[in-house]
Structures are given as C-alpha cells and as structure tokens.
Amino acid sequence: HQWQFPLANASIANALLEACGPRPLSNLPGLDDDLLCSWLERAQNASALQYLFLGTTGTHSRLHLDPGGLDLLIAPLTGLKRFTLIHRDDAYLVRRLDTDHPYQDTVSSSIEYWETSPTLPLARKWCADIKPGQVLCMPEGTLHAVRNLEPCLSYHRFHLDRHNLSGFWRALVDGDSFGIRPAEILWNATHAEMLRLDALADNFTSDITHQADTNLLTLKALRDVIKALLGEFFGIDQEVSSHDQKEDHVRGSHFDWKSLLSDVENCLEYYAESCTFRSGEKKQKKKSVVNRISRH
C-alpha cells in the first residue's frame, strides 16, 4: 500500500507533519533545502512527494528507475528492507534493448533478469539491508529494486536541491516526469528562493551565514536552468519538432520565462548591492513582473 500523505485529507496530513516536522530528513548532511517544498500550496510548505509504504514479507519492486531526475530518501519505520542498487553510469548495461524510452520505469521484466542478462555482471551493484534508524540516500538516476525481508512500514521522500538540478533538467527535457510538473516546480522554487534572498538582503549584516551562501548559490543554479530552458525550447535555431509533445509543459501560457529570468537577475543584483552598500547608498529593488503559480 502506498499513501502520498501530504495530499491526503488536510487535517490528517497536517497532524502527521506536525508530529514529525514539515520536512522530515531535511537536516541530513549534504542536503540543501528541498526545492520541492515550494511546489504546491496545498502541501503547505512541505513536499508533496512524500509517501508511506506498507507491505508484507516478500513485497518487492522490479528493477526500475524513478522518473523526474530526483534524489530519493528512504527510511524504514518498522521492519527490514533489502535494496539492490545499480550505479547510474552502468544503467545501459541492464536496460532492455526493446524499450523506446531510455528512462522507462520498467527497465527489466523481473529481478530474475539479473541472472540471464549477459551484460549485468559488468555493472557495479550493491546490496544493502536497511532497518529502522537508518536512511538510504539514493542519487537521481540510480536503478534499484526493493524487497521486504519482514513486514515493513517505510517513509519515502523525493528530494531536489542545487546539487541534483542536472538530473532534474535532463528529465524535464526528455519528458521523463510522469506524475509531476517539472516546469511548475522550477517556476515556484525560483520564486521561493527569490523571496528568501530578498529577506536576507533587507536584513543584511556583515555576518554572512552558511544559509545565505546556500540561498545565493541555489538561486544562481536555478537561473542557469532557466537560461538553459530558454535556449532549449525557445532558441531561434531550436527545432521545435524535436520536442513535439514534450514541450507543452514548458510552453504554457502561464509561463513567461524571460520575465522570470529578469526578476532573478534583479534579485541577485539587489542582494549584491545589499552586501556592499554604505549608509544611504542602497538602491530600491525593482518590482517583480511575474508571480508564483498557485495550483492545488
């Protein structure tokens, strides 16, 4: 059984999030703030892509690759889970040759495929048993299969920050984002980061914190993704037909990517001025021309 609890009954979801904090596992070393928390207003500043999985002994998944180019965090709450992981650079050694989509979820027909694949022994493979108190941090693009060794309840959460934006970008371009809206995630995450950096600029002190540095680097990374998106989907020499149906989620009438990029540049300029101004020299920030997308 799978429960995407942030999108369930509001009172139930809120009670669960209040009990464990709105962003479980968010303080793990090496993780920046989760950009997915800015996506849906309905989730109330929590990621919509959080799940609880419940299964009996023997419940398992096929070897697969989750769409979206997102990292995945998994923490058993009760029971023992076994994970088999294939290095993402070796995925081509185990993908079926008869699939038309390089990131299709059903990469192999069954776990037994490993015993018959002529190239699988060449792939780097790890097996790990994860128990309560442990967390598996799986980088985007990692092929994996899961099996419950005991009746198990586990918490699963997708994660996006500046460190895995390249995988997110690749999934956006390839149209490999079943069940999520990557352009909307990018748009709303950028707005949220601009608000955070504006707040830091308005209350700037000479004591630059790690969080301020992180927010700045994140917004610059999002700016680069927006620039890449403009070149990929709206460039003068771009062959529009190469994306055909995949481009609709980027070219929606509610997206004005050039204006958003201009807002980001203004935000970065305003922050830079706030870091260097002397009394009376601070300039007024230009007003944003685009707004956050409000969708539930």
Image (cartoon, rainbow, N blue to C red):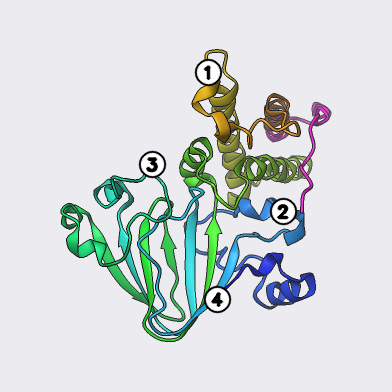
Instruction: Give x and y (percent) for residue 290.
Output: 79, 32
Q: Which mark is residue 1?
A: 4
Q: Residue furthest front?
A: 98
Q: How far apart are marks 3 and 4 (CA)?
A: 29 Å
Q: Looking at the image, can residue 44 be seen? A: no
**Which amino acid, by three-letter code, is at mark 3?**
Asp
Sequence-first disc among 4 and 1: 4
Q: Quadrant of residue 194?
A: top right
Q: Is residue 288 above or below residue 81?
A: above
**Which amino acid, by three-letter code, is at mark 1?**
Gln
Magenta span: chief secondary structure: loop
Sequence-first disc among 2 and 1: 2
Q: Which of marks 3 and 1 is in front?
A: 3
Label 1: few (<14), some or many (≥20) within 10 Å?
few
| Residue at 58% in and 50% down | 210
Q: Which mark is residue 100?
A: 3
